[in-house]
Amino acid sequence: MKGRTPWDEAQARAVIAAKSAEPGAVLPILHALQERFGYIDDAAIPAIAQALNLSKAEILGVVSFYHDFRRAPVDGATLKLCRAESCQALGCEDLVAHLGHAHGVEVDHADPSAPLVVETVYCLGNCALSPAALLDGEPIGRLDAQAIDEVVARAAEKRS
Amino acid sequence: MSARVTIPADSGAVSVGADRTARAIARQAQARGVEVSLVRTGSRGLYWLEPLVEVDTDEGRFAYGPMAPGDVPSLFDAGFPAAGAHPKALGLVDEIPYLKNQQRLIFSRCGVVDPLSLDDYLRHGGLAGLREAIALGPTRTIEEVVASGLRGRGGAGFPTGIKWRTVAGVAAEQKYVVCNADEGDSGTFADRMLMEGDPFTLIEGMAIAALAVGATKGYVYIRSEYPHAFALVSAALQRARAAGLLGASVLGSGRAFDIEARLGAGAYICGEETSLLESLEGKRGQVRAKPPLPAISGLFGKPTVVNNVLSFASTPWILAHGGNAYAEYGVGRSRGSQPFQLAGNVKRGGLVELAFGATIRQLVEDFGGGTRSGRPVRAVQVGGPLGAYFPQSLLDTPLDYEAMLAAKGMLGHGGLVVFDDTVDMARQARFAFSFCAAESCGKCTPCRIGSARGVETVDKIVAGRDRPQNIQLLRDLCEVLTDGSLCALGGLTPLPVLSALDHFPEDFLKDSPRAAAE
């Protein structure tokens, strides 16, 4: 299943080798690793550095710069919730509050007991249908408290 | 012959159920033994009507929307796919005023064609611009783009033709064409719509640029928040290669050019062109000091054209119709058309492509129909998170580069975000700083530190602590950011902050428990 393969050094090296000849290969490699394993394992850093003849510090610098790259696996669904201006104009912050008191889900806070992970993003380009979100890549427009309740219920069901 | 029915597969349309509606139509058609040929298109950009279902009739394309799956059985009862009376019937799509009153040069095919069908693309005028460019040769191609007056649609507004001429004039073994598809501004979605709805126009535009400047390799840098656009562009690139539109000899011209799609990784700053180049090179997306300009020393140190999606996508029309024909649209030094994007608290949100010159009010009231909440419009932010907030009294400002600058704002990527009278403008000013702090690349001090100090200072003002002094401090801080930042992120964050402070001072001066005590 996408993003759920357990970390495997040999597989990781194959993923890295397949892309290391590309110009500016670091981001394509990191995306490929995250797609396969769901996150960037610590052991990937020296492996990429070695393959590209760069320092570990340089690779770690890139991994930590970009919001997308995760350093630990995530269990369950991920909701990327837009909190930029257009979604603010239609109450996305009320949805953040609703997630907190109705479901005990704190945005941008990894909690293994929570039914899903909710991450802040700034703009999904669906601003004519704000508030907007992406649930594991599936776009949701005109999000409201009821839709949030459904998303949380579905995520909880999947996990149990 | 079975009726051609179109439903957008645009991610915005899908976000409100277009896939479910498409499945419902397929099921009903099968159950009733009615033959329909279902085609998934991009969106027309009339988002409040999504999912928008269209069917070919002798008079033109007849539209229904917004079509929930539950509306589908009654639609067939009303005689679908023949155009019939139905509560969701909108008439001929081209007669819908929102669409009829636009000047669609770039977006003429979006929502009309199958985005991945080159045959469709050719039937609707595709590749005429590239063929003309091949016939004209590099120098005359560039002269057409210069004559068009096209300016960079990413926000900076630099003349596209001049940029191309600079790159063409530099001797180098390797040159690049890079498309900035890192459309991170809140309230903008035109790049996404085009990539999902008509990606061949972007590919054609990049090929025109490449042949004009002598580049053989191109990159499209697409933000990771746009997975659908990335998939569509990648698929379109494969088809373009298979058809000889890209590769060793572009359309048989003997000139080589190919494009690779690259995915960003969630960094707003990578929409800044030099950060984007760093990111493409595999580094942290940190801004480079200019000079040297990317046109002289860009990707991997080579001369590079970096343009926005809409800039590239404008050039096929310009080449096909001539630079002068394009320059006939618009006002002053803002020539041609701009795809505006209406977003936020607005009744009819969507894409409105118009010749330059319309006012904010025309967009928000005539096209947008006011707020979705039904409350009065209080503020409109133009140009993304680094754009100014306009109050009611300035809504008659025309949307062109110079007029926006004169009003201490900027056009940016053409996004308009509408707020009703429940908005707290001090909170919006605070957000501008906190966004800048979150997305700063960290290279220059005014942006990295100043943004955090800005958040604190707004908090102090709102809390009622030494208000006159802290307001002065806020203005001083904005001056430092404006004058001392390396790029537009730090340099323009003062626009939303100061416009909020200047036009809505009452929101900063509300009674607070502390102010009352002092």
Image (spheres, grey):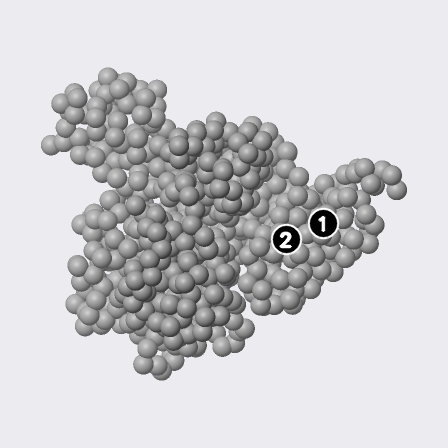
Q: CA distance from mark 2 to mark 1?
A: 9 Å
Residue A107, above or below B240: above
- Identify the image quadrant of the N terminus of chain B: top left
Q: Nearer the viewer, residue A75 or B88?
A: A75
Q: Which residue is mark 2?
A: B433
Q: Secondary structure at mark 1?
A: helix
* Chain letter belonging to callout 1: B
* Chain letter belonging to callout 2: B
The residue at the point 13 percent across, 23 percent down is B33
Residue A7 x, y percent position in the rendering: 36, 55
> Is the residue under label 1 in contact with that under label 2 (CB below 8 Å)?
yes
Residue B399 x, y percent position in the rendering: 53, 50
Residue B481, above or below B23: below
Amino acid found under the numbered disc labelled 2 = Phe
The residue at the point 58 percent across, 68 percent down is B443
Q: Which residue is mark 1?
A: B458
Q: Does residue B319 appear left or right of residue B349 in this picture? A: left
Amino acid found under the numbered disc labelled 1 = Val
